[in-house]
Image (cartoon, rainbow, N blue to C red):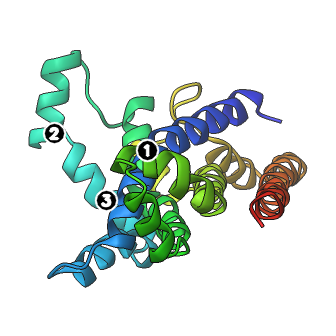
Amino acid sequence: MDWTALWLSLELAGLTAALLLPLSVFAGRWLAYSNFAGKGLAEALVALPLVLPPTVFGFYLLVAFGANSFVGQFWQALFGHQLVFTFAGLVVASVIVNIPFAIQPAQRGFEGVSVELREAAAACGMDPLRRLWKVELPLAWPGLMTAMVLTFAHTLGEFGVVLMVGGSIPGETKTIAIAIYDRVQGFDDRGAAVMSAALLLISLCAIATTFALSRRVGRRLS
């Protein structure tokens, strides 16, 4: 077992989920409640990482973050090192590629909050922020939990984007998915099997926990 790669993957997945949580709340709510020209295009852009092959998406991110790009040059000037082939670059790429996993379930969660309930809260004098905190978030919480767990689990298993943007630098960008690939390439089937089983178990536990919490929240609100 490559414990360094596993810990790095867990750290990457946790950071990605934490960074995407506020975005999923506000973007998901906005898409759920708003009707505007170009909404279909906005939803298509959110879903784009789902349909692009990871290596293609990773290539575009590699170009966008490279030393010759505006983003890459800005990062270099700000922090004194390049963005690609670093853990920070992995975090940024992971946040972008996981946008649909975070926003779409959150949007569905907010869509489940009835218009009548939101209008009643507004009629009672609640300001938008209080309505969000007291009414909408408790009802949309199962969707938000699903978003975070899907983001976490997908980040753990992401391979193509991680390899393109981060490479395979031990302790820096070598995640558990890359480590499994390296073990297979080195004909270490037993090592690959152990790490694959650990990844499977972690993902299964995360999803099962989400379902259990969603049911508990649903019973509490019913």
* Circle nearer the N terminus (1, 3): 3
Q: Quadrant of the C terminus?
A: bottom right
Mark 1 or mark 3, whichever is nearer to me: 1
Q: Nearer the viewer, residue 176 or 99?
A: 99
- For label 1, the residue is 130
Farthest front residue in view = 124
* Residue 97 spot, x, y in % from top left: 42, 58
In terms of secondary structure, where does tag 1 sit? Answer: helix
Q: Name which residue type carries label 3.
A: Phe
Q: Residue at x 50, y 58 (%)?
A: 102
Farthest top residue in view = 80
* Circle nearer the N terminus (3, 2): 3
Q: Name which residue type carries label 2.
A: Val
- For label 3, the residue is 59
Location of residue 53 (image quadrant): bottom left
Query: How far apart, in angstroms, are the residues tagged by discs 1 and 3?
Result: 42 Å
Label 2 neighbourhood size at 10 Å, few (<14), some (14-19), many (20+)?
some
- For label 2, the residue is 71
Q: Name which residue type carries label 1.
A: Arg
In terms of secondary structure, where does tag 3 sit? Answer: helix
In terms of secondary structure, where does tag 2 sit? Answer: helix
Q: Nearer the viewer, residue 220 or 152?
A: 220
* Residue 1 spot, x, y in % from top left: 83, 36
